[in-house]
Amino acid sequence: WRIASKLDRKQKTQLVTTLIHSRIDFCNALLVSLKDCDVKRLQKVQNSATRFIFGQRKRRGVTLLRKKCHFLPIRQRIDYKLCLLVFKSLHGATPDYVKEMV
């Protein structure tokens, strides 16, 4: 059973966003201090997910494919999400407990 052949690109992107990116985004504050070797492991997961979306082989580059999906590399994604959280907390768009932490 291969699920990839049954789904279109939009559905595959939703699946990746739901199962992978939501898990990464859930703990961005913890991932900031992650070692480079661990970030590379997460990046490999994202690269595999991008290949799944486009149905590409393992040896092909994924940078252009990742840009087509508007996926940031993992390190940049972690930094972006953390900066967004700080911005929102400074402008009153987060709960009080988050404001107190910043």
Image (spheres, rainbow, N blue to C red):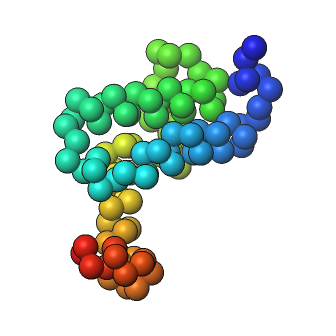
Q: Is residue 19 above or below residue 29?
A: above
Name the spot of residue 73 as percent of width and height, x first: 39, 43
Q: Is residue 84 left or right of residue 10?
A: left
Residue displayed at 28% across by 50% down: 30
Judging depth in this view, the residue of 43 and 29 nearest the camera is 29
Judging depth in this view, the residue of 98 and 35 nearest the camera is 98
Judging depth in this view, the residue of 94 and 69 nearest the camera is 94
Q: Is residue 49 above or below residue 88?
A: above
Q: Is residue 74 left or right of residue 102?
A: right
Q: Is residue 39 left or right of residue 72?
A: left
Q: Among all residues in the image, which is located at the extreme right? A: 6
Residue displayed at 29% across by 36% down: 39
Q: Is residue 30 above or below residue 97?
A: above
Q: Quadrant of residue 45?
A: top left
Residue displayed at 43% across by 52% down: 26
Count of numbered circles in the view: 0
**Quadrant where the C terminus lies?**
bottom left
**Quadrant where the N terminus lies?**
top right
Whether residue 13 is visible here, answered yes or no, is no
Q: Quadrant of residue 2?
A: top right
Name the spot of residue 85 as percent of width and height, x first: 37, 68
Q: Is residue 10 left or right of residue 90?
A: right
Name the spot of residue 78 as percent of width and height, x first: 34, 52
Whether residue 45 is visible here, answered yes or no, is yes
Judging depth in this view, the residue of 34 and 36 nearest the camera is 34
Q: Is residue 100 above or below residue 44?
A: below
